[in-house]
Image: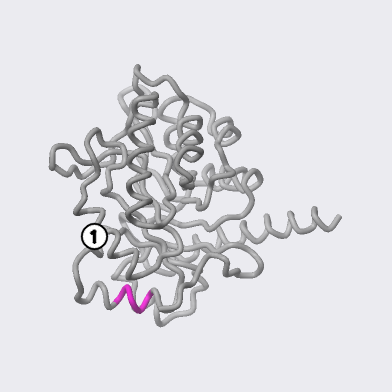
Amino acid sequence: MTRRSFDARLDGAPLAGVGFKPEHAEAVFETPHGVGFFEVHAENYMGAGGPPHRMLEALRARWPLSLHGVGLSIGSAGPLDVSHLIRLRRLVDRYQPALFSEHLAWSSHDGAFLNDLLPVPYNRETLQRVCDHIDDAQETLRIRMLLENPSTYVTFETSTMSETDFLGEIAQRTGCGLLLDVNNVHVSAVNHGFVPEDYLDLFPVAHVGEIHLAGYAEDSDGTDRLLIDAHGTPVADEVWSLYRRALVRRGPVPTLIEWDNNVPAFLTVAAEAARAQDILNIETQRRSRRIAA
């Protein structure tokens, strides 16, 4: 299989993609859509074969592929699950993805796997543990990992570092990249009362290799707004605004639309990717004019 990478360009700019859903397969393969790449959750393809792999092979033959892990449990107190790493390695070797990403979170303990991505305190002890786990993962998988900033709903009294400093230190120590989830920035900012633009201005953007965009749901904790990273609605206007700000700092990078709940028709999701692509193209053109001036 010939490897395709995100060096490919669409209209002179990095690509905008979407998460692949099997129910969208006919529309993906049979209708014109302009989506530049597709992301799949790695854990959905850890079986040995069958229809899921036949579909993924057909997808990988036509478009660049990004693998997004949800079960590696990078922030867990114990060691990484070796069998999980081996299955991931087989998947990476088989499909040669352009990107592989995981979450700054933990989701397993004492052999039990939890159906959630749970936060970690930002201190030196956690920093060393996360760095050790990323070193183990990158050495085993032989691919650079992108680590995603989380959406959070609680903070820890034991934290001694900001989230942006914590992520920057991880990237410096391990050589991993970062996945900047702009929706997560907005969700956490509302939940914890900080200014999302200030967060983006402090984010270590030199390490960012991909951006995620998604929709959120709104609730209340009884008195204040509470946002949930729900991936079940279009990208909000506030998130599009933050996305533009992030691109001004970082420059254009591959951008993914996440839509995992209340999933609409494929062309609805593709239209969100087209909007991201337009913004990528505009920023690319702006930088080209500045260089030429």
Nearer-the-camera pick, 100 or 174:
174
Residue at which label 1 appears: 87
Q: Is residue 81 above or below residue 127?
A: below
**Residue 152, percent from left and from top:** 36, 33
Q: Dot 1 surroundings within 10 Å: few (below 14), some, or many (20 or more)?
A: some
For this orientation, the residue located farthest to the top is 157
Classify residue 222 as left or right of residue 179.
left
| Quarter holding residue 79 | top left
Nearer-the-camera pick, 251 or 147:
147
Name the residue type under label 1.
Answer: Arg
Total numbered labels? 1
Q: Is residue 234 above or below residue 271?
A: above
For this orientation, the residue located farthest to the bottom is 30
**Residue 110, percent from left and from top:** 13, 37
Residue visible at 39% across and 30% down in the picture: 127
Q: Which residues are magenta?
A: 55-59
For this orientation, the residue located farthest to the front is 139
Residue visible at 39% across and 26% down in the picture: 122
**Residue 197, percent from left and from top:** 58, 34
Q: Is residue 118 above or below residue 291?
A: above
